[in-house]
Image (cartoon, rainbow, N blue to C red):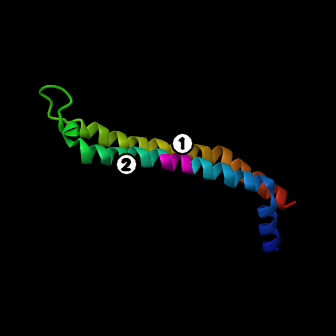
Amino acid sequence: MNDTIYQGIENNPRFKELVKKRGRFAWLLSIITLVLYVGFIFIIAFVPEWLGNPLYAGSHITRGIPVGIGLIVISFILTGLYVIKANNEFDSLTSQILSEVKK
């Protein structure tokens, strides 16, 4: 019984669409995250004094603090985007696939 369900899922065109969409979206978010973090590391490596400069004259907070916090916030936002898309589009496709296979 399970083998026929699994085979039905694998052969379903909606499943192939789901895998393709989810993969593309995950890669896109991964690339965005990688570019941001690698960019941050490059700034640390090649222009550390820029991050060490104060935000404005007389400030004790350097540019590195908001940049670092921004990276963390962007990571949460990207995770939230994935969760929203997964809960709406991906779960909907998954439900459709399961209902078609169980018929």
Q: Is residue 77 left or right of residue 67?
A: right
**Image side of residue 47 versus residue 14, left or right:** left
Q: Which mark is residue 81?
A: 1
Instruction: Give the SS element for disc 2.
Output: helix
- Decide if residue 103 is on the left or right side of residue 82: right
Percent x, y of residue 21:
66, 48
Name the kind of residue labelled 2 in the image.
Val
On whether residue 7 falls in the magenta region, the answer is no
* Residue 28 % position (x, y): 54, 46
Residue found 25% across the figure and 40% down from its top: 65
Q: Residue at x 37, y 43 (%)?
A: 71
Spatial distance from mark 2 to mark 1, Cα to Cα? 21 Å
Farthest-out residue, front: 46
Q: Nearer the viewer, residue 99 or 9?
A: 9
Dominant secondary structure (helix, strand or loop) of the stretch shown in magenta: helix
Q: Secondary structure at mark 1?
A: helix
Q: Quarter-wise, where is residue 7 in the image?
A: bottom right
Q: Nearer the viewer, residue 30 or 5?
A: 30
Identified at 33% across, 44% down, the residue is 40
Q: Amino acid at mark 1?
A: Leu
Which of the labelled discs sits on residue 38, or is there none? 2
Task: Say the numbered circle drawn on residue 44.
Answer: none
What is the magenta range?
27-31
